Image (tube, rainbow, N blue to C red):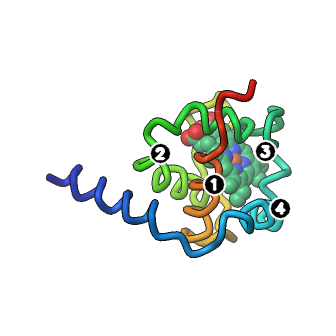
């Protein structure tokens, strides 16, 4: 039951967008995500396209999981280096970023 409620919540979050998707690259720029992430190249963090390829089959749940990780930081999925917390980013902005990343075509490389 708990899991079901979580899924419904995640689906609602997925459908209610406050920032248009064209604005997200600008948000990523402002939030300095590009210091560690690029579309196709591995910098300190994994490429956005690889993140999409890993998670986009579970995009409904992953929007919220990735948003939390963007704000609070964390590791364990890509190697020994964890992501730093990005607490200058709001959870709403982080959800927009996660939604945008997950919508990238992960088959590019
Ligand atoms: C100081 C470097 C750094 C910055 C700045 C940074 N990241 Fe990361 N990011 C990382 C690293 C390292 C990982 C890999 C973490 C892991 O192994 O799970 C990561 C992972 C991720 C993931 C995938 C998480 C997963 O579990 O697969 C997403 C999504 C992400 N970053 C988005 C962002 C966004 C959006 C920003 C800007 C607000 C940002 N990152 C800023 C270093 C960074």
| 71 or 3: nearer the viewer | 3
Residue that badge 4 annotates = 29
Residue 59, numbered label: 2
Bin the neighbour count of mark 1 within 10 Å (Cα to Cα): few under 14, some 14-19, many 20 and up. Answer: some
The label nearer to you, 1 versus 3, is 1
The answer to whether any part of residue 82 appears in the image is no
Residue 25, numbered label: none
Mark 1 within 8 Å of ligand 1, using the beta carbon: no
Alpha carbon separation for disc pair 4 and 3:
10 Å
State the SS at label 1.
Answer: helix
State the SS at label 3.
Answer: loop
Alpha carbon separation for disc pair 2 and 1:
10 Å
The answer to the question of whether label 4 and label 2 lie on touching residues, with beta carbons closer than 8 A, is: no
Mark 3 within 8 Å of ligand 1, using the beta carbon: yes
Alpha carbon separation for disc pair 1 and 4:
13 Å
x and y percentages locating residue 22 in the rendered image = 73, 64
The answer to the question of whether label 3 and label 2 lie on touching residues, with beta carbons closer than 8 A, is: no
Alpha carbon separation for disc pair 1 and 3:
14 Å
Residue that badge 1 annotates = 100
């Amino acid at each position: 039951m708990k899991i079901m409620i979580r899924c419904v919540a995640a689906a609602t979050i997925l459908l209610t967008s406050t920032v248009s998707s064209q604005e997200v690259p600008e948000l990523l720029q402002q939030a300095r995500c590009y210091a560690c992430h690029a579309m196709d190249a591995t910098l300190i963090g994994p490429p956005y396209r690889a993140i999409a390829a890993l998670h986009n089959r579970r995009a409904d749940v992953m929007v919220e999981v990735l948003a939390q990780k963007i704000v609070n930081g964390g590791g364990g999925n890509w190697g020994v280096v964890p992501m730093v917390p990005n607490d200058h980013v709001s959870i709403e902005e982080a959800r927009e970023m996660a939604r945008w990343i997950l919508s990238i075509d992960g088959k590019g490389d």
